[in-house]
Image: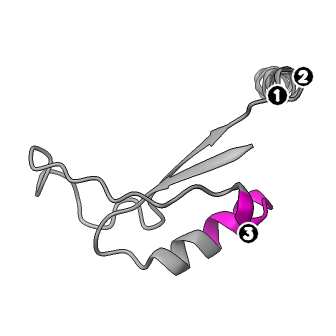
């Protein structure tokens, strides 16, 4: 698994990475370089600090693990409906 983290310029990179490492339980070597996107079009349109830990994307490069996780998600989805 590889983890990409996108943060905003006002966030502390070390704090955000610590948060996501604890939340995911993944080691530091699974994390790619943190990116800070620049979007002039959305500047000032959304509430400041709406995403206090940025955005994370987890990539799974193992087909068997991917299907196992998707099965867990389906199981949770149907368990909450019933």
Report which residue position mark 2 lands on.
Answer: 64
Residue 18 x %, y %: 63, 75
Residue 80 x %, y %: 78, 29
Of helix, strand and loop, which one carries label 3?
Answer: helix
In this orientation, which residue lies closer to the viewer: 47 or 54?
A: 54
Q: CA distance from mark 2 to mark 3?
A: 24 Å
State if disc 3 and disc 2 touch (CB < 8 Å): no
Q: Against 14, is 51 above or below?
A: above
Q: Quick one: label 3, few (<14), some, or many (20+) residues within 10 Å? A: few
Residue 43 lies in quadrant:
bottom left
Report which residue position mark 1 lands on.
Answer: 62
48 left or right of 25 in image: left
Task: Read off the magenta span.
Answer: 19-29
On residue 22, which mark appears?
Answer: 3
State if disc 2 and disc 1 touch (CB < 8 Å): yes
In this orientation, which residue lies closer to the viewer: 15 or 49?
A: 15
Q: CA distance from mark 1 to mark 3?
A: 22 Å
First in residue order: circle 1 vs circle 3: 3
Q: Residue at x 33, y 59 (%)?
A: 36
Q: Residue at x 17, y 48 (%)?
A: 39
Q: Quadrant of the N terminus?
A: top right
| Pair 2/3: label in front | 2
């Amino acid at each position: 698994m590889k983890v990409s983290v996108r943060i905003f310029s006002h966030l502390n990179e070390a704090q955000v990475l610590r948060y996501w490492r604890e939340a995911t339980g993944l080691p530091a070597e699974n994390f790619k370089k943190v990116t800070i996107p620049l979007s002039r079009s959305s500047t000032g349109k959304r509430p400041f600090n709406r995403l206090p830990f940025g955005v994370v994307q987890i990539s799974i490069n193992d087909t068997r693990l991917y299907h196992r996780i998707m099965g867990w998600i389906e199981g949770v989805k149907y368990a909450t409906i019933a």
